[in-house]
Amino acid sequence: MNPIAPETAVDQERQTIRLQNSVRLVTKQEDGRPLERLPDGIFGFTYSPASDAIPLFVRHAKASFEVHKPASGPYQILGYLAPSQVEARAQDVKLYPDAFGEATKLVAIASDRIGRLKGPSRAGGNYL
């Protein structure tokens, strides 16, 4: 008998945000389509959150960002910030797809709060 690994705290945090946004994972038929061509109420994973198209995929690979397209409101990019940046509501931040260094706080940033996206860096944690 193989024991089932318990959910991690990160999985639970992501699931909480997904429930708040009422989103479901993109289907295999939707895999790779640009965000603008997908229905509301979905989420997926991308290596290209700063591109115009933002293709979303079913597979969550390391260093890929989770993107939500809720039924109401702008799309959101999930990532990690340093707790000090969250508390200070910093204006210029490095958002990481996975916890990296001091960036340990999972956040969802709405696209209408993003002035400019630069990256991902492809080095040093793949930050935006």
Image: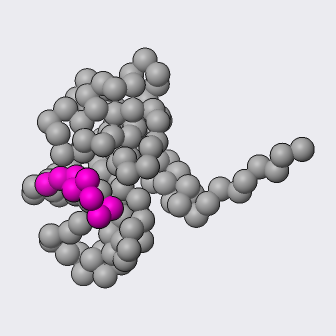
Tell me the residue at 39%/22% (across/down): 30
Quadrant in the rendering for residue 52: top left
Question: Can you give x and y, in whole percent of width and height, for residue 42 in the image?
Answer: 40, 34
Q: Which residue is at a point 53% across and 60% down the rendered structure image?
A: 10
Quadrant of the drawing holding the C terminus? bottom left
Q: Residue furthest front?
A: 123
The question of residue 96 being in magenta is answered with no
Judge whether residue 120 is colored magenta. Answer: yes
Q: Nearer the viewer, residue 39 or 32?
A: 32
Residue 118 horizontal side relative to residue 25, left or right: left
**Please, which residue is most extreme toward the right here?**
1
Magenta stretch: give its range: 118-125
Q: Position of residue 24 (x, y in %)?
A: 47, 35
Q: Residue at x 84, y 46 (%)?
A: 2
Q: Main secondary structure of the magenta part?
A: loop
Whole-percent x, y for residue 107 in the image: 36, 62
Nearest the camera: 89 or 28? Answer: 28
Pinpoint residue 29: horizontal percent, then vertical percent.
43, 17
| Image quarter in which the N terminus is found | top right
Image position of 40 with respect to 48: above or below: above
**Observer-nearest residue: 67 or 46?**
46
**Which of the two residues, 16 or 9, is positioned nearer the viewer here?**
9
